[in-house]
Amino acid sequence: MKQIKHILYFVAVVMASSCEIDNYDQPNAELYGTFIDEGTNEPLAQDIINGTVIELIEQGWVEDQTNVTQTLVCKGDGSYQNSQIFSGEYLVRAVRGNFHDIPPIESMEIKGRTELNFLVTPYLRIIDPVIEKVGTTVTATFRIEQTSTQNVSRIGLYVHPNPNVGNPMTLTSRVESNINRVTDPSETFSLSIDLDANSSTLLQGNQYYFRIGALSSAASAKYNYSPAVRFTI
């Protein structure tokens, strides 16, 4: 009989503990903003695959906390947003970007709706881009502005049904060219995709996005892009 009483007591304790109210605070803050080219004051287009990431480390939650990092992934248009953040002081840093390194923000208060825009300098700028479809050929012409003495490693014309088209998100019908030199800002580059020759991947009657990309040879550089243009094949 005593054994039964002990079992019933144990069950009652377990049930009581499981019914405790979860009184932890919910995320109550939002961080949003845009990566902006400080030279043009325009949003800086990004890759959504292996593109720019914002890292947040909350300060003061645990002494000398360094290993709990929240990440915010940047969108293709250069913007970002996360509404599931706890109010507090954070170390904020942008990493894996297609722009020259910027210093981290050592301490920033995030409370309510907090806007944080990053003014950055891209490795390269695509100048005067023109992407045209003439007959069965899509041709891109453009110039390149370098923001450092690093070589231009590669240029490309990328194509995909998704508007976030770029080097990591492209069909095999893309065209690329290795440059591996410093370019003159007055030099015009031209890249073309023959639609007939790529009819197995670029299906007639479908819509595709085309975008110019250029890659610097700087360590850890990512592609810089022109705006995407949509055509019906």
Image: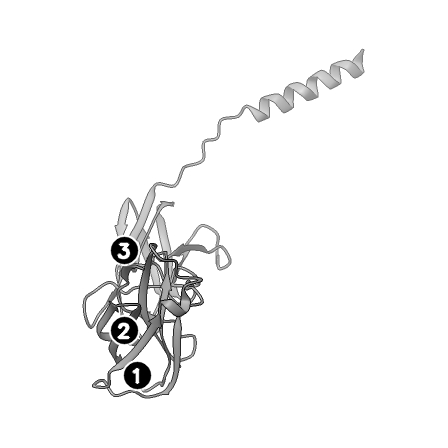
Q: Is residue 190 above or below residue 85?
A: below
Disc 2 marks which amino acid?
Ala
User: Is tag 1's residue or tag 2's residue first in the polypeptide sequence?
Assistant: 2
> Left or right of 209: which side holds 169?
right
Residue located at (36% from left, 60% from top)? 92
Q: In the image, 38: left or right of 59?
A: left
First along the sequence among labels 1 and 3: 3
Q: Position of residue 25 (x, y in %)?
A: 41, 37
- The answer for how far apart the CA atoms under marks 2 and 3 are is 31 Å
Q: Which residue is mark 2?
A: 140
Which residue has dot 3 on it? 33
Q: Which residue is mark 1?
A: 148
Q: Can you see residue 146?
A: no
Q: Which quadrant would residue 216 be assigned to in this image?
A: bottom left
Against 21, residue 185 (above or below) is below
* Residue 205 position in % (x across, y down): 33, 54
Q: Extreme top residue here?
A: 1
Q: CA distance from mark 1 to mark 3?
A: 26 Å
Q: Is the residue under label 2 in contact with that under label 1 (CB below 8 Å)?
A: no
- Residue 34: image quadrant is bottom left
Give, as a three-letter code, the residue at label 3: Gly
Q: Secondary structure at mark 2?
A: strand
| Amino acid type indicated by mark 1 | Ser
Residue 210 or residue 151, whichever sits in front: 210
Q: 189 or 73: nearer the eye?
A: 189
